[in-house]
Amino acid sequence: MTDTINKIIDLQCEINKDIDSLVNLKEEISQVINGVEQTDYRMILEKRYLCFHSWENIANEMFYDLRWLHRLHGRSLESAGRIYEKMYADH
């Protein structure tokens, strides 16, 4: 019984560490997205990576053709990549 309780406690500690890591990662992603200057690019990234909306949903919400949305998404990622490089170049 004691072994089982210890395993449960260990698993809870692992889960808490994983949750902390995910919260930190989400904060980093949010900072990078917030650094993107173009409003449309930022909105696409927020809706997709922070709100987990589908591509179809984002296209409908933003009144974009799905193919155009994917093209803008690529540009958004390029912009976010430049922000990321600036923010974490020292690390």
Image: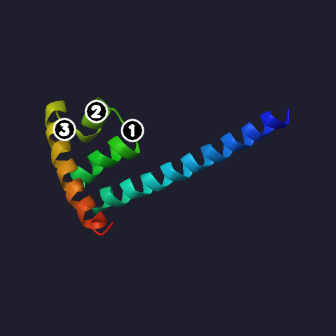
What residue is shown with label 3? 69
At mark 1, the secondary structure is loop
On the picture, is 74 further left or further right than 10? left
Q: Earlier in the sequence, mark 3 or mark 2?
A: 2
Name the quadrant of the N terminus: top right
Mark pair 3, 1: CA separation: 15 Å
Marks 3 and 1: CB-CB under 8 Å? Answer: no
Amino acid under disc 2:
Trp
Q: Earlier in the sequence, mark 3 or mark 1?
A: 1
What residue is shown with label 1? 52
At mark 2, the secondary structure is helix
Amino acid under disc 3:
Leu
Q: Residues within 10 Å of mark 1 (few under 14, many from 20)?
A: few
Q: Quadrant of residue 89?
A: bottom left
What residue is shown with label 2? 55
**Eyeballing the image, is 30 above or below 72?**
below
* Residue 17 appears in the picture as rendered: yes
At mark 3, the secondary structure is helix
Residue at the image point whose x is 36% and y is 44% from the top: 49
Q: Residues within 10 Å of mark 2 (few under 14, many from 20)?
A: some
* Residue 38 appears in the picture as rendered: no
